[in-house]
């Protein structure tokens, strides 16, 4: 009996040890601070798929963009210092009028509350534009708006890549085209300070530069061979790229199929 009890104690001790070792492994995914836990904590289920915190953040950011960029575009048309500035303002108005209707429909369907005023930073940008005139206004208009579009551009791509919600995925696709169109038009003004954008981006980077080595000036570089399909492969599609400086934003008028807009 004493031997049996001793064996039982050893087995119990082994089970407890194995359980203690295994616990952190199987419970890790549920611990606060992990990617999986954060995703689950901020996600709600909808009939269009899970809606994450990142999804909701994009919805709000798209709405906020329209709340300050549309009046900025209207101001540009009213002042019309140059044809290029006026055309950029025209694209801001048209693009955000369309995108705002889309985001309001999506937000109503997903029960996401939207802001009705630009945030403090955006209001500050509008004040800067209102206080400027002449060449200073042109530079501020082009660079404030170009910088804002450049910051949301990668955010849209990240959500478009990771979202599991079909409404958010389509909104990200629509927003991507609109933002690219606006970036293109702002750059056409000739006022964008690309050095400042590059320096601001570099200031936020902590990784070492990557990519091919820097070229040697004056040294010839061999042409790269084309990428081609194998023999017997038939294709029917055509490249979607437009001439330089053009972005195709044509798309059907957004439809409110659930009658969610008042």
Image (spheres, helix red, strand yellow):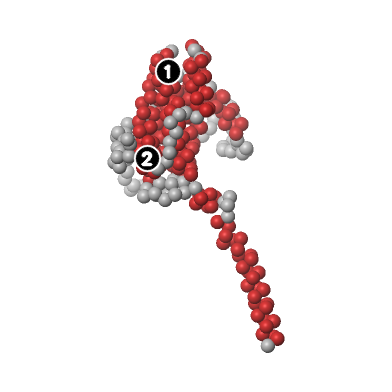
* Crowding at mark 2 (Cα within 10 Å: few <14, some 14-19, many 20+): some
Q: Which residue is mark 2?
A: 108
Q: On residue 27, which mark appears?
A: none
Q: Residue at x 42, y 14 (%)?
A: 79
Please tell me in which quadrant of the rendered image residue 171 appears: top left
Residue 236 appearing in the image: no
Residue, far top? 134
Task: Give x and y (percent) for residue 125.
Answer: 51, 23
Q: Which residue is mark 1?
A: 76
Q: Mark 2 and 1 residues: CB-CB less than 8 Å, in contact?
A: no
Q: Residue at x 57, y 31 (%)?
A: 201
Task: Give x and y (percent) for residue 104.
Answer: 37, 36
In the rendered view, does 66 fall on the left or right side of 212? Answer: left
Residue, far front? 262
Task: Give x and y (percent) for residue 109.
Answer: 36, 42
* Crowding at mark 1 (Cα within 10 Å: few <14, some 14-19, many 20+): many
Vertical comparison of 237 with 25: above or below: above
Vertical comparison of 32 with 248: above or below: below
């Amino acid at each position: 009996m004493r031997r049996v009890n001793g064996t039982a104690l050893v087995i119990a001790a082994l089970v407890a040890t194995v359980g203690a070792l295994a616990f952190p492994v199987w419970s890790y995914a549920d611990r606060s601070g992990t990617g999986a836990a954060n995703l689950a904590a901020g996600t709600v289920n909808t009939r269009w798929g899970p809606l994450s915190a990142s999804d909701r953040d994009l919805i709000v950011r798209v709405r906020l963009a329209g709340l300050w960029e549309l009046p900025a575009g209207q101001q540009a048309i009213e002042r019309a210092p140059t044809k290029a500035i006026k055309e950029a303002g025209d694209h801001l108005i048209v693009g955000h009028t369309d995108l705002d209707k889309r985001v309001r429909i999506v937000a109503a369907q997903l029960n996401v509350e939207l802001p009705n005023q630009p945030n403090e930073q955006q209001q500050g940008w509008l004040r800067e534009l209102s206080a400027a005139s002449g060449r200073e206004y042109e530079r501020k208009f082009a660079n404030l708006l170009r910088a804002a579009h450049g910051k949301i551009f990668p955010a849209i791509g990240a959500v478009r890549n990771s979202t599991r919600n079909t409404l958010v995925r389509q909104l990200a696709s629509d927003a991507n085209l609109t933002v690219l169109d606006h970036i293109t038009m702002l750059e056409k003004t000739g006022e964008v300070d690309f050095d400042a954008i590059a320096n601001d981006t570099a200031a936020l980077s902590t990784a070492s530069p990557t990519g091919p080595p820097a070229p040697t000036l004056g040294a010839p570089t061999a042409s790269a061979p084309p990428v081609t399909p194998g023999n017997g492969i038939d294709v029917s599609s055509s490249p979607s790229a437009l001439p330089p400086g053009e972005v195709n934003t044509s798309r059907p008028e957004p439809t409110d199929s659930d009658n969610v807009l008042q």
